[in-house]
Amino acid sequence: MPGLGAYTAAAIAAIAFGERAVVVDTNVARVVARYYGIERTIEESRNQVRGLADSMTPSDRPGDYAQAMMDLGATICRPKRPLCGECPLSPDCKARSSGRPEAFPATKIKRHRPHRHGLAWWVERNDSIWLVRRPAKGMLGGMAALPGPEWSDEAPTVSGLATISHGFTHFTLDLLIAPRTSPPEGEGWWQPIDRIGEAGLPTLYARAVDAVLARKDALAA
């Protein structure tokens, strides 16, 4: 099923149905990496961590075990300032014995994300704004949006009502929202502003609408 990955499927199998399934989220991966002294990043050691997590998973009460491991990572074996003195695994934990548990696993190096620019048109009529649906493939595919050209490396040169800065996984974006009085083109629909919450806008465009409405309210005050 879309959106149902290995972790969620394993958690459902173990917690809801009592099946022996290997449940590995970020917290569990950190516990395993520290316990076995794995210094590489989680991304680099994913298969090794999963194999070790498998070897640790019991057949008896696997759901309780999975929840205990997740809670252990979230509350005790924390990314920073882990509470090693309260951890039931500390006697055999290689990270603790090293004297520098926070060094395990290694922190993923943040890569520079390119910056892009976008333009969204604000077309308003009778207390409604014109919305379109983004192409099925690509970023925010198939979702409702304000109309506008594809995002690019060049900043728009028109005057805008507001600019929204947003971060995606692989790049950052400045979206300029500009007024447009010409009739809308292509397929779309008029969405009443007082029912904008029903449009299903993704966070980027919901923030854009909020910014424009806030600006209009401030000018009217």
Image: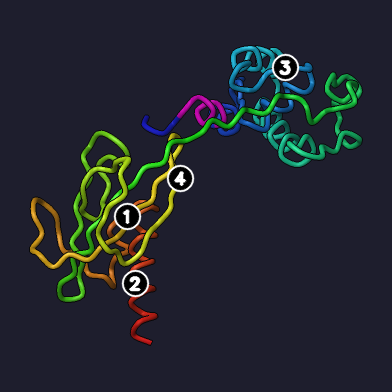
Distance in Å between CA atoms under marks 1 and 3: 43 Å
In the orientation shown, which residue stands out farthest toward the bottom?
Answer: 221
| Image-quadrant location for residue 77 | top right
Please say if the residues under marks 2 and 1 sit with CB atoms less than 8 Å apart. Answer: no
The reply to whether discs 4 and 3 touch (Cβ–Cβ < 8 Å) is: no
What residue would you read off at disc 3? 56
Query: Mark 4 or mark 2, which is nearer the start of the sequence?
Result: 4
| Amino acid of disc 4 | Gly
Where is residue 131 drawn, in percent x and y? 20, 57
Mark-to-mark CA distance, 2 and 3: 54 Å
The disc at residue 213 is 2
Task: Please tell me whether mark 1 or mark 3 is closer to you in this view.
Answer: 1
Above/below status of 71 relative to 157? above
Quadrant position of residue 189: bottom left
**SS label for mark 4:** strand
**Which is nearer the N-term, disc 2 or disc 1?**
1
Drawn side of residue 126 relative to residue 111, left or right: left
Asked if the magenta segment contains residue 89, the reply would be: no
Seen in the picture, residue 155 relative to 30 is either above or below; the reply is below
Q: Which quadrant of the rendered structure holds the C terminus?
A: bottom left
